[in-house]
Image (cartoon, rainbow, N blue to C red):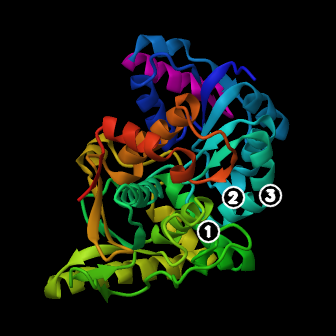
């Protein structure tokens, strides 16, 4: 069915939404896209700012709709090839958006890190999305594109040599961060607010929470919770907060690809903090900070205190902070034949916002414009877009290499 628009950016007035809009303006030649959200006057304000970057952006269409209004979401989804959403927390605001896309056969991408919500979407919509051809692709930001596409890159590198992956260990190298946005804070608070729900808790602790129902379980256990030694480098590691979603997305990719990485494939993630006493001190400091924040966030008074200390919705790091940020993920892998290799994924922007805007923008463009496998479902970036998205991100200046 012909669609009026290629992409609708839903949530364009939020902090991350505005960054994605700016990115699409720079990449927009030949792309039919629109801004969408709840309030027309705020969308018009965003459009005016974009027009200052490129006068042609002043003609961008504006679509108005509330994410909780299924009728409005149906109207938007029927008009577009891809809905790109930055409206979180997704467990609160995302259900009707996804449902509308599924029924319209419209592809969808977002930047959620809410494992329990993704599990809910899989159960509710995977089969129907397969039938309608809608590609529903969560986690198209720093969680979890570098991890998911980095492992896929290593898999394809080995497959070309007649080998396959046996194990991979993602290690985040500490760089200058860009800081938190208010939207990310709201999402984290929402997860902790509902952590007493058994379904939420199971999704957070089960390493195979996102695998298809009935899929064989592999050998992976729970994520790291304390400082540890890296078996490869001998240095120290600390828990990585995004591992709880990244590892599960990688495992879902393996399962949806027919266990191409192997039924005994193992994957884990941690922050690399360096060697010696200094490395141990950094690892212990990260653990203490995560433990303290978690202890506060699980109780209402603690969440209220964190809400006063952390950015409010719509706020986030400055342009200078974002441009000063960097990220680097090293994936140390071993093949079934015993070969060792490393995948490097890196970017010259802060991961959470500058980098995520590039990743989400290119994911939306890939879903809208690239010649992709003709199947729908609740997919992952590696399964839905694969090497097409790797090529796009390389062209956008990000590093993806196997060595």
- Nearest-to-viewer mark from 1 and 3: 3
Q: How far apart are marks 1 and 3 (CA)?
A: 20 Å
Q: In this view, does 327 lie above or below 204?
A: above
- The residue singled out by tag 1 in the image is 191
Q: Earlier in the sequence, mark 1 or mark 3?
A: 3
Q: Do the residues labelled 3 and 2 touch (CB within 8 Å)?
A: no
Q: Which of marks 2 and 1 is nearer the N terminus?
A: 2
Q: Can residue 205 be seen in this view?
A: yes
Q: Where is residue 278 in the image (x, y as percent from the top left)?
A: 16, 83
What's the magenta region? Answer: 34-53
Indicate which disc residue 332 carries: none
Q: Is mark 3 on a helix, strand or loop?
A: helix
Q: Are marks 2 and 1 in contact (CB under 8 Å)?
A: yes
Q: Nearer the viewer, residue 248 or 116?
A: 248
Left or right for 108, reference 155:
right
Q: How packed is label 1: few (under 14 Cα within 10 Å), some, or many (20 or more)?
A: many
- The residue singled out by tag 2 in the image is 91
What secondary structure predominates along the stretch shown in magenta? helix
Residue 222 covered by magenta stretch: no
Q: Which residue is drawn at 27% across and 65% down?
A: 342
Residue 47 covered by magenta stretch: yes
Q: How packed is label 3: few (under 14 Cα within 10 Å), some, or many (20 or more)?
A: some
Indicate which disc residue 124 carries: 3
């Amino acid at each position: 069915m012909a669609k009026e628009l290629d992409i609708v950016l839903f949530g364009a007035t939020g902090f991350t939404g505005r960054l994605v809009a700016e990115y699409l303006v720079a990449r927009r030649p030949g792309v039919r896209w629109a801004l969408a959200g709840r309030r027309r006057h705020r969308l018009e304000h965003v459009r005016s700012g974009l027009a200052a970057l490129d006068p042609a952006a002043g003609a961008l269409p504006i679509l108005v709709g509330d994410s909780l209004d299924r009728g409005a979401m149906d109207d938007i989804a029927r008009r577009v090839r891809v809905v790109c959403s930055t409206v979180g927390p997704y467990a609160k605001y995302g259900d009707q958006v996804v449902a509308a896309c599924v029924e319209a056969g419209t592809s969808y991408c977002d930047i959620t890190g809410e494992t329990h919500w993704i599990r809910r979407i899989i159960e509710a919509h995977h089969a129907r999305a397969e039938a309608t051809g809608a590609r529903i692709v969560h986690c198209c930001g720093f969680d979890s594109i570098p991890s998911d596409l980095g492992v896929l890159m290593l898999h394809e590198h080995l497959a070309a040599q007649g080998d396959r992956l046996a194990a991979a260990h993602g290690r985040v190298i500490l760089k200058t961060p860009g800081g938190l946005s208010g939207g990310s804070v709201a999402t984290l608070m929402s997860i902790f607010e509902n952590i007493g729900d058994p379904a939420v808790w199971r999704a957070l602790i089960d390493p195979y929470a996102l695998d298809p129902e009935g899929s064989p379980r592999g050998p992976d256990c729970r994520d790291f919770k304390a400082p540890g030694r890296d078996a490869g480098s001998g240095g120290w590691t600390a828990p990585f907060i995004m591992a709880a979603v990244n590892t599960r997305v990688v495992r879902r990719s393996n399962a949806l690809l027919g266990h191409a990485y192997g039924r005994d494939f193992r994957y884990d993630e941690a922050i690399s903090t360096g060697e010696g006493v200094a490395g141990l001190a950094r690892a212990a400091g990260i653990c203490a900070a995560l433990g303290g924040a978690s202890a506060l966030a699980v109780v209402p008074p603690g969440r209220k205190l964190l809400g006063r200390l952390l950015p409010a919705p719509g706020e986030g790091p400055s342009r200078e902070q974002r441009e000063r940020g960097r990220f680097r993920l090293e994936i140390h892998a071993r093949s079934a034949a015993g070969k060792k290799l490393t995948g490097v994924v890196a970017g010259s922007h802060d991961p959470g916002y500058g980098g995520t805007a590039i990743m989400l923008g290119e994911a939306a463009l890939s879903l809208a414009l690239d010649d992709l496998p003709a199947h729908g479902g609740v997919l992952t970036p590696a399964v839905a877009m694969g090497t097409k998205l790797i090529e796009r991100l390389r062209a956008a200046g990000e590093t993806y290499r196997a060595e």
